[in-house]
Image (cartoon, rainbow, N blue to C red):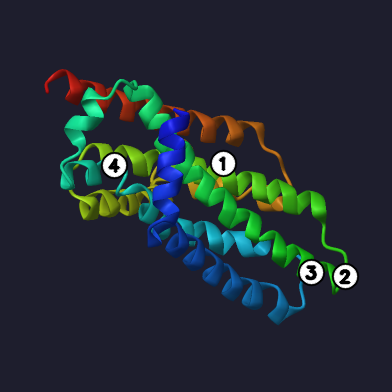
Amino acid sequence: MWAVLKKEIKSYFLSPIGYVFIGLFLAMCSLFFYLDVLNYGSLQFENMFYSAATILTFITPILTMRMFAEERKVGTEQLLYTSPRSITSIVFGKFFAALFVVLIAELFTLIYLAILFLFGTPHVQTALVTILGFFLLSMAYVSFGMFASSITENQIIAGVVTIGFFIITWFLPNFSTVFQPLSLITMFDKFPLGLIAIEEIVSFVSFTVLFVLLTIIVLQRKKSVK
């Protein structure tokens, strides 16, 4: 897994992908920081993340749509299946590499928290809980984006499927509370309130594990028929 992890991290930063993701994320966070915090004289760092969570919906595919779809595009899929490394280690390597890029982007948001300390005393505990919730949300998003990349040969289709699924989950709870566990944005909403919600943490982790396992199953089945 470590070899795959290092290879994938290098690929993110030896190409524009990692920089584009981090750049877009911070550009939008800067805008929301100005509109939601500085423009209204608020010291609530967590307000920015409500909007940032929505933006994450649309930029996650930058990291995930290439994961496995690109292997088919450049003709290295067969090497993936004949590699001495297990499918599980490859999947986890790619998954944690994408999360590493997200983590870097998230750590940069601490700059905004530092700026707030110049004007007053923001609530640090709430800020940290919000960052935790956002990382859990990111884990869930990356896991599904990776799954979408594993079931199609086209990066664009993988990206559209990922965004489409997340948008649909926004509205499903409006039809029935049965779909509440699928609404990742709704689950995130408690964290900016400073609440460490165990139920939501379990839901995020379960969602992530589910789609990581589904990705492994899909790739194992494809390997078996090669």
Name the residue type under label 1.
Leu
What secondary structure is marked by label 3?
helix
Quarter-wise, where is residue 39 in the image?
bottom right
* Figure quadrant of the C terminus: top left
Q: Residue at x 39, y 58 (%)?
A: 17
Which residue ends up furthest to the left in the rendered image? 226
For marks 4 and 3 on the same chain, the one whose residue lies earlier in the sequence? 3
Marks 2,1: beta carbons within 8 A: no
- Which residue is label 3 attached to? 116
Mark 3 to mark 2 CA distance (whole Å):
6 Å
- Which residue is label 1 attached to? 136
Q: Residue at x 78, y 65 (%)?
A: 114
For marks 3 and 1 on the same chain, the one whose residue lies earlier in the sequence? 3
For marks 4 and 1 on the same chain, the one whose residue lies earlier in the sequence? 1
- Which residue is label 2 attached to? 120
Q: Residues within 10 Å of mark 1 (few under 14, many from 20)?
A: many
Q: Which mark is residue 148?
A: 4
Asked if one can make out residue 43 in the rendered structure from this viewpoint, the answer is no
Q: Residue at x 47, y 41 (%)?
A: 97
Q: Percent from the top left, x then y, of residue 90?
A: 36, 29
Mark 4 to mark 1 CA distance (whole Å):
19 Å
Marks 3,2: beta carbons within 8 A: yes
